[in-house]
Image (cartoon, coloured by chain):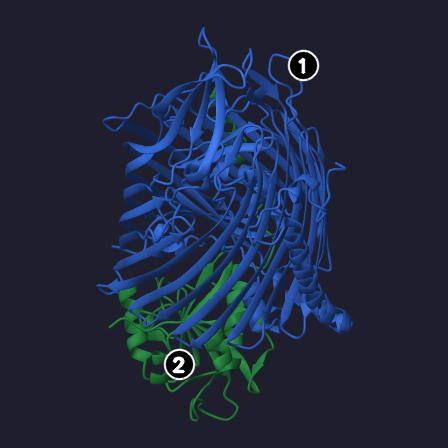
Chain colours: A blue, B green
Amino acid sequence: MNRWNVGGPPPVARVQAATPFDMPSRATAWGLLSAFLLAAAAVVVAPHCAIGMPVAAAATDTVEDASDLTRIGLEDLMKLEVTSASRHEQVLSNVASAITVIGRDQIRASGATTLAEVLRMVPEMQVAHIDANIWSISARGFSGRIANKLLLLVDGRSVYSPIFAGVYWDEQDLLLEDIERIEVIRGPGASVWGANAMNGVINVITRDAHDTRGAALGAAAGNEELGGGSARWGGTLGTRGAFRVFARGASRAGSAIPGTAENAWDSWSGLHAGFRADVPVSDRTRWTLTGDLRSGDAGQSIYEAIDSPPYKLQVSPRTTVKGGNLMASWQRKLSAYSDITLQGYTDVSDRNDDVLQSHVETYDLEFKNHVSNGRSEFVWGLGGRVVRDRLDSTAVLYFAPDHEARSMLSAFAQDEIVLDNRHVRLTLGTRVESSYDAASSARPEWQPSIRAQWSPGERHSLWGAVSRAVRTPSRAENDIRYHLATMPTGGPPAEVTIYGDSAFQSEILVAYEAGYRFAPTPAVMFDVSSYYNEYSRLRTVEPGSSTFSPTPTPHIDVRESWENKMHGDTRGIGGSIAWSVSRNWKLNANASCLVMRLHLDPGSQDVSSVSGENNEPAQQYMLQSQFQFTPRWRWDATAYQIGRRPSQSMPGYTRLDLGLAWQVRDGAELSLMGMNLLQRRHYEDDGVQSGLIPTQVERSFTARVSVLLGSNR
Amino acid sequence: MRSALLIALCAVSGACAAAAPSHAADGPSEYEVKAALLFNFAKFVTWPAGSFASPDAPFTVGIVGDDPFGKALERTLAGKTVGGRQIAIRRWRKVHDRAPCQILFVATSDRDERKQVLDDVQALPVLTVGDTNDFARQGGIIGLTVEDNRIRFEINPAGADHAHLAISSRLLSLARVVSPHR
């Protein structure tokens, strides 16, 4: 845990590797970001300190008078969370895609302490633990340690890594209590969200700072979740604004390598601090500022290729991550019918271990205009992003070039048209993106979609969609040289190295979707979605030349490269039922089926990609009960049944999580969660595809306490 | 065995739920907040001169159809005044029984009846409020929606103009502005 060094100096080795490249050194970048965050924090906190007392008193009044709602201002009234049986109405009436919205009560009911674990409850999503800090997560297939077809955005900020194409879930250490909701769209969201929103998009929306005034403290301890604590403090800014600052630290236990007493060294610890400020400066204009600093330390066990027998070595490298970001968003209502949003962010992310030494800076600016005229809702926008990286060589890989700046420009437009007296809604949209780097020119990618929705009555809604989405090449696919393995041959060993290629192209999806929603009563909502996805130009690993090399020891150089020589389709169906049985009891259930059929293009000599990707459970089920059995006691239960993964030796599994929470008094809660109660331990992924030595999910218990002070919940 | 566990899980939850008395969960109920919103609408909308029969006539909030508020409306509005006038609450089961009022909450579940009410009052200085799907787009003036467990509202300014009601810009700034379908 003494590895936590937020904003600390970078390792000396990195500074020595300086090149003529004109980007600031890591030390400077970190210094700049820290200065930014400090300045922002000062801006946020200073006005509060000056007028702290009277404002705090006013906020308390509001809370005390909560029984008389007419004394609450209109804005605050609209922020009050209400208990409602008809909350699905919006979803039912307006969205022509497969969307799941996870609210605060469902996050709480899941007992999850990480975003990855929360996503288990979403239909059509594949979530599996590989080790204690690495998950394989995707939607509608193609999961893996770094699944490249799923986009994750936190308050509109992309956290998809352009280096290896995918999300590092261990870095997404969010304060779950401050999440307002998680919107998961399965299927392409590319016409709005852009490239890599191919099989799905996850939007994490954190709570408005007006909703988190007061202080909140939380602590957790258990046999897997060894210890964690969080503190948040929020207040008002001037007459209308609000802010919060928070810090969180947590530590999770590692596991034993199954069948041995050996430690897999997959423990994890992290620290995260940040702020959010929401400032409506007038009736028309509103600012939102957010910033985070985080650091983490994660372990894993892998087999590393070496040049002499036994040619592979079990190593347990530690990964250290450091990151920070700052985002500003400005919204203005131009008229009653039109508004504009301008949003910019910068993100710095370092990830260092024996395999990868990376430093990535992202600068992103987006403009959006929304125009409503009753019969249509038109949105268009422009965006620009610059990603600058430095990827230092390690024992097993290097990048050529080892530093690069890539720019991306994008534009999108979408129109939702209401036809036939509101029974039919038609949504047409497209996004075009192109990326530039020093070596190559613009590669425009068009990602159109057409969606239609028909509501024959208020209780039924049918929708269908056709869309095209792309998954753009990662930096690794273009530029990496990665020593994958050394294989004994009888003669000199074969050293297999994979070469990235600038000719590697985007993967392409054309998706056909249809869905049906039905609310027989306001308390029940059925939602079924189905899809047929046609993929082309999927990534394969193609063998290249084999040459004998006498130095340093005699060996055969086997050169492999990534090419786009696989195609295929996936089809599936996902259904869910949300039923508010009574005001105190809610049930959620879902079921998903998935069939993948992948084929190599003629001429491909790939031997691993078809089986490697065709690796999803054919069926999975979830049942969740959220039960408030007295005003102070709550009982939550979630059961999962996950089928066998076809390419893996391990069986399917059933998992049961239970939680009991006691509200000791208003604002103070004690809870006990038991996770994976049915089995002492089980595998969820065999790790073969990821090259990791997997560990098992163990039965675990976590006790938590949370206290809200002077907060308006 | 697995399915048995799932069944057991359901059964246990169900048995407890059936046995437990009904409790209000955290937070105010949906209709308590909606009642408070009606009070706010009364403050942020200006009715034309001559809307009231006499200087001491009450400010009348009417509900037509199946009243969803229960006691929430009385509890929230009891003893309150709007522009110096007492608030009176009146309920009508049937569309035809309707009498003059300043705010009319349209709670008829039948779409044709709803359309009839809205047509009847569209030229009168009556603020029509409802929470059925797309209420404001179907000719009502303010439609209430629930999004993320919070109450939001849509305003149809053309409808307000037609009824000679002036809606404050503050209210408009918090609303989603919509136009009715033709």
Q: Is residue A496 visible?
A: yes
Q: Are marks 1 and 2 on the same chain?
A: no
Q: SS class of the residue under badge 1? A: loop
Q: Position of residue A668 (x, y in %)?
A: 72, 49
Answer with the quarter of the image where residue A151 lies: top left
Q: Up-down: is A673 above or below B151?
A: above
Residue type of the residue flagged with mark 1 = Ala
The spot of residue A162 in percent (x, y) is 47, 44
Question: Is A645 above or below relative to A58?
Answer: above
Q: Indicate the quadrant containing the C terminus of chain A: top left, top right, bottom left or bottom right.
A: bottom right
What residue is disc 1 on?
A: A261
Position of A117 with respect to A536 (left or right) is: right
**Which residue is located at x 52 percent, y 62 percent?**
A344
Quadrant location, the N terminus of chain A: top right
Residue B126's disc is: 2
Q: Residue at x 52, y 38 (%)?
A: A625
Q: Nearer the viewer, residue B163 or A1?
A: A1
Work out whether residue A621 or residue A301 is closer to the camera in this orientation and state it: A301
The reply to whether callout 1 and callout 2 are in contact (CB within 8 Å) is: no
- In the rendered view, does A161 fall on the left or right side of A93? right
Residue A452 rendering spot, x and y as whole percentages: 26, 54
